[in-house]
Amino acid sequence: MEIILIGLVAFFASIMTFFSGFGLGSLLLPAFAIFFPIEIAVGATAVVHFTNNLVKGGLIGKYGNWSVLRKFGIMAFLFSFLGSYCLLLFSGFEPLFTYQAGGKQFTVLPHKIIIGTLMFLFVLFENLGSKLESKFLSNLYLGGAISGFFGGFSGHQGALRSLFLLRLGMSKEQFIATGIWIAIVVDLARLSIYRSFLSNVDPEDSIILALVVGIIAAVIGAVIGRRLLKKVSLSFVNNFVAAAILLISLLLILGIV
């Protein structure tokens, strides 16, 4: 059962994340966490995420904006180490509260409420045309630091990264490719910290098969996403990103992901 669920989530989330630049980790982590301890789930999700980004980099990476990558990526890389260490220090988060819905229990954590609220407010300000938001989201160094930190801390780097990159007026190919390279940089940093989560896994443990299935499904989703990219417009990508950010922010606040 866990193999099928993880494969399906990885496949569909991979297609979605090709356009939005985020979502694979946010959706895949809860799927892994249903069946495996949270530290194993975090490590496995990071491995699938990294592999998926490498494949996407091969498919569309040539369109990356290297000027943006230098400014945003360096800060994201450095602060992702800080976020990853904070995760290790504060891995036992006490939930604010839990609730039941549809026969399932959901846990609301403080850091997820903070991240979700930030994402929600940024999208709201974007649509209201806030001058403060405009100036804030134009700072690529600040964007890299925020995105990198939360990428290491909770894995939710993509939505925050996309909020900053959307303002640069890049083509759809540049927007997606630049986000992929930044994600790879952050993944390298956090995997160097997360490797301890998977260091004691038995090679015959079911997590290995789940991990392999997740990687294969995510790769197939990335290939399909690349084919679909030719058929969509930049405005579709922009609107899709905004809608996806709002959805993920609400799911985070509600403790669903």
Image: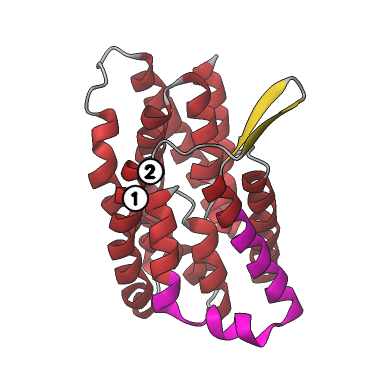
Write down the region rendered in magenta: 115-143
The part of the image, by quadrant, that contains residue 149 is bottom left
Q: Which mark is residue 90?
A: 2
**Image coords of residue 207 (percent x, y):** 37, 20
Q: Is residue 127 visible?
A: yes
Quadrant where the N terminus sits is top right
Q: Residues within 10 Å of mark 2 (few under 14, many from 20)?
A: few
Disc 1 and disc 2 in contact, CB within 8 angstroms: yes
Residue at the (54%, 75%) spot, across then down:
171
Q: Who's the residue at 34% across and 21% down the image?
A: 208
Reply yes or no: does residue 137 show up in magenta.
yes
Is residue 194 rendered to the left or right of residue 236?
A: left
Residue type, numbered disc 1 = Cys
Q: Regarding mark 2 in the picture, which secondary structure is present there?
A: loop
Does the magenta segment cover residue 103? no
- From this view, report whether residue 20 is shown above or below residue 29: below
What secondary structure do most residues of the magenta stretch adopt? helix
Residue 61 placement, left or right of 220: left
